Image: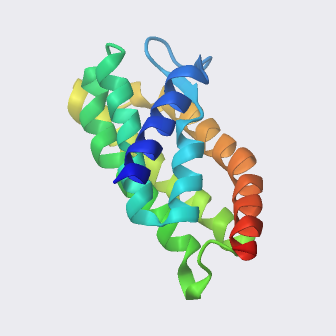
Amino acid sequence: MVLSAMFVALVYLATAFVRVPSPFATGTGQIHTGTAVVFVVSIAFGPKMGAISSIGMVLFNLTHGLALWAPINLIVRPLMAVIFGSVARLKGADGRNVFLNAAAGILGGLWLLPGMYLGELLVFQVPLSAPAVGILGNSLQIALALIFGLPLIAVLNLHKAKL
Protein backbone atom coordinates (compact mmCIF):
# COMPACT_ATOMS: atom_id res chain seq x y z
CA MET A 1 0.00 0.00 0.00
CA VAL A 2 2.88 2.35 0.75
CA LEU A 3 4.41 1.78 -2.70
CA SER A 4 1.03 2.41 -4.32
CA ALA A 5 0.62 5.72 -2.50
CA MET A 6 4.19 6.73 -3.33
CA PHE A 7 3.70 6.01 -7.04
CA VAL A 8 0.36 7.88 -7.13
CA ALA A 9 2.16 10.83 -5.54
CA LEU A 10 5.05 10.61 -8.03
CA VAL A 11 2.66 10.63 -10.99
CA TYR A 12 0.77 13.55 -9.47
CA LEU A 13 3.99 15.51 -9.00
CA ALA A 14 5.28 14.68 -12.48
CA THR A 15 1.95 15.80 -13.93
CA ALA A 16 1.64 18.95 -11.82
CA PHE A 17 5.17 20.31 -11.81
CA VAL A 18 6.84 19.08 -14.98
CA ARG A 19 4.36 20.32 -17.58
CA VAL A 20 3.95 22.96 -20.21
CA PRO A 21 0.83 24.18 -21.97
CA SER A 22 0.45 22.37 -25.25
CA PRO A 23 1.40 24.49 -28.24
CA PHE A 24 -0.96 22.28 -30.26
CA ALA A 25 -4.17 22.86 -28.31
CA THR A 26 -5.98 25.75 -26.75
CA GLY A 27 -7.48 25.77 -23.29
CA THR A 28 -6.37 23.06 -20.90
CA GLY A 29 -4.14 20.94 -23.14
CA GLN A 30 -0.82 20.17 -21.46
CA ILE A 31 2.29 18.15 -22.09
CA HIS A 32 3.56 16.56 -18.88
CA THR A 33 5.83 13.82 -17.64
CA GLY A 34 3.18 11.96 -15.63
CA THR A 35 2.82 9.48 -18.50
CA ALA A 36 6.57 8.75 -18.30
CA VAL A 37 6.27 7.88 -14.61
CA VAL A 38 3.29 5.60 -15.28
CA PHE A 39 5.32 3.96 -18.05
CA VAL A 40 8.26 3.27 -15.75
CA VAL A 41 6.10 2.06 -12.85
CA SER A 42 4.04 -0.22 -15.14
CA ILE A 43 7.11 -1.90 -16.56
CA ALA A 44 9.31 -2.00 -13.46
CA PHE A 45 6.58 -2.95 -10.96
CA GLY A 46 3.87 -4.50 -13.11
CA PRO A 47 0.64 -3.48 -14.81
CA LYS A 48 -1.44 -3.43 -11.63
CA MET A 49 0.92 -1.01 -9.88
CA GLY A 50 1.08 1.08 -13.05
CA ALA A 51 -2.71 1.27 -13.21
CA ILE A 52 -2.85 2.36 -9.57
CA SER A 53 -0.13 4.96 -10.12
CA SER A 54 -2.10 6.53 -12.98
CA ILE A 55 -4.65 7.73 -10.40
CA GLY A 56 -2.12 10.53 -9.78
CA MET A 57 -3.29 12.12 -13.04
CA VAL A 58 -6.91 11.93 -11.89
CA LEU A 59 -5.95 13.62 -8.62
CA PHE A 60 -4.16 16.31 -10.62
CA ASN A 61 -7.34 16.92 -12.61
CA LEU A 62 -9.39 17.20 -9.43
CA THR A 63 -6.99 19.62 -7.72
CA HIS A 64 -6.23 21.88 -10.69
CA GLY A 65 -9.68 22.87 -11.91
CA LEU A 66 -9.81 20.15 -14.55
CA ALA A 67 -12.38 17.86 -12.95
CA LEU A 68 -14.14 17.15 -16.25
CA TRP A 69 -10.96 15.37 -17.38
CA ALA A 70 -10.94 13.09 -14.32
CA PRO A 71 -13.42 10.49 -15.65
CA ILE A 72 -11.53 10.30 -18.94
CA ASN A 73 -8.22 9.75 -17.15
CA LEU A 74 -9.84 7.33 -14.70
CA ILE A 75 -10.62 5.00 -17.60
CA VAL A 76 -7.98 5.70 -20.24
CA ARG A 77 -4.82 5.97 -18.11
CA PRO A 78 -5.13 2.74 -16.06
CA LEU A 79 -5.81 0.77 -19.24
CA MET A 80 -2.78 2.41 -20.84
CA ALA A 81 -0.71 1.31 -17.82
CA VAL A 82 -2.00 -2.26 -18.10
CA ILE A 83 -0.94 -2.32 -21.75
CA PHE A 84 2.50 -0.94 -20.84
CA GLY A 85 3.09 -3.50 -18.11
CA SER A 86 1.52 -6.49 -19.85
CA VAL A 87 3.40 -6.10 -23.13
CA ALA A 88 6.70 -5.55 -21.29
CA ARG A 89 6.17 -8.83 -19.43
CA LEU A 90 5.37 -10.99 -22.47
CA LYS A 91 7.25 -14.29 -22.68
CA GLY A 92 8.57 -13.83 -19.15
CA ALA A 93 10.59 -10.73 -20.07
CA ASP A 94 9.61 -9.05 -16.78
CA GLY A 95 10.39 -5.60 -18.22
CA ARG A 96 13.99 -6.54 -19.08
CA ASN A 97 13.66 -6.57 -22.88
CA VAL A 98 14.21 -3.10 -24.33
CA PHE A 99 12.36 -3.97 -27.54
CA LEU A 100 9.29 -5.20 -25.65
CA ASN A 101 9.48 -2.13 -23.43
CA ALA A 102 9.53 0.14 -26.48
CA ALA A 103 6.66 -1.83 -28.03
CA ALA A 104 4.79 -1.47 -24.73
CA GLY A 105 5.17 2.30 -24.92
CA ILE A 106 4.02 2.44 -28.51
CA LEU A 107 1.05 0.13 -27.97
CA GLY A 108 0.04 1.99 -24.80
CA GLY A 109 0.23 5.19 -26.83
CA LEU A 110 -1.90 3.66 -29.55
CA TRP A 111 -4.55 3.12 -26.87
CA LEU A 112 -4.07 6.57 -25.32
CA LEU A 113 -4.74 8.49 -28.53
CA PRO A 114 -8.20 7.12 -29.40
CA GLY A 115 -9.05 6.72 -25.71
CA MET A 116 -8.52 10.42 -24.99
CA TYR A 117 -10.20 11.38 -28.28
CA LEU A 118 -13.34 9.37 -27.51
CA GLY A 119 -13.33 10.52 -23.90
CA GLU A 120 -13.34 14.15 -25.00
CA LEU A 121 -16.18 13.48 -27.42
CA LEU A 122 -18.29 11.84 -24.72
CA VAL A 123 -17.53 14.15 -21.79
CA PHE A 124 -17.39 17.49 -23.56
CA GLN A 125 -19.97 16.78 -26.29
CA VAL A 126 -17.86 18.55 -28.91
CA PRO A 127 -17.79 18.15 -32.72
CA LEU A 128 -15.82 15.19 -34.07
CA SER A 129 -12.89 17.34 -35.14
CA ALA A 130 -12.41 19.18 -31.83
CA PRO A 131 -10.46 16.49 -29.91
CA ALA A 132 -8.06 16.04 -32.82
CA VAL A 133 -5.93 18.93 -31.52
CA GLY A 134 -5.00 16.78 -28.50
CA ILE A 135 -3.51 14.00 -30.61
CA LEU A 136 -0.20 15.77 -31.12
CA GLY A 137 0.18 16.63 -27.43
CA ASN A 138 -0.68 13.09 -26.35
CA SER A 139 1.76 11.74 -28.94
CA LEU A 140 4.45 13.96 -27.45
CA GLN A 141 3.65 12.60 -23.97
CA ILE A 142 4.20 9.06 -25.25
CA ALA A 143 7.45 10.13 -26.95
CA LEU A 144 8.63 11.68 -23.66
CA ALA A 145 7.66 8.49 -21.82
CA LEU A 146 9.86 6.50 -24.18
CA ILE A 147 12.75 8.99 -24.16
CA PHE A 148 12.87 9.30 -20.37
CA GLY A 149 11.42 5.94 -19.42
CA LEU A 150 13.46 3.45 -21.43
CA PRO A 151 16.83 4.52 -19.98
CA LEU A 152 15.40 4.71 -16.47
CA ILE A 153 13.91 1.23 -16.79
CA ALA A 154 17.29 -0.07 -17.96
CA VAL A 155 18.95 1.44 -14.88
CA LEU A 156 16.28 -0.01 -12.59
CA ASN A 157 16.76 -3.41 -14.19
CA LEU A 158 20.51 -3.23 -13.54
CA HIS A 159 19.77 -2.46 -9.91
CA LYS A 160 17.29 -5.36 -9.69
CA ALA A 161 19.95 -7.72 -11.04
CA LYS A 162 22.27 -6.82 -8.13
CA LEU A 163 19.67 -7.56 -5.44
**Is residue 112 rendered to the left or right of residue 65?**
right
Q: Is residue 90 above or below residue 24?
A: below
Residue at the spot x=22%, y=30% of the render? 123
Residue at the spot x=32%, y=13% of the render? 65
Q: Quadrant of the C terminus?
A: bottom right
**Is residue 30 rendered to the left or right of residue 160?**
left
Q: In which quarter of the image is the N terminus?
A: bottom left
Front-lying residue, 104 or 58? 58
Q: Is residue 104 above or below residue 33?
A: below
Q: In which quarter of the image is residue 68?
A: top left
Q: How is the image coloured?
A: rainbow
**Is residue 154 rendered to the left or right of residue 135?**
right
Front-lying residue, 107 or 156? 156
Front-lying residue, 2 or 84? 2
Total numbered labels: 0
Q: Is residue 83 above or below residue 7?
A: below
Q: State the image coordinates of residue 131 (x, y, percent, origin top left).
A: 40, 29
Q: State the image coordinates of residue 119 (x, y, percent, origin top left).
A: 30, 38
Residue at the spot x=49%, y=12% of the render? 26
The answer to whether residue 139 is visible is: yes
Q: Quadrant of residue 61?
A: top left
The answer to whether residue 126 is visible is: no
Q: Which residue lies furthest to the bottom in this view?
A: 91
Residue at the spot x=68%, y=70% of the render? 160
Q: Which residue lies furthest to the front in this view?
A: 163
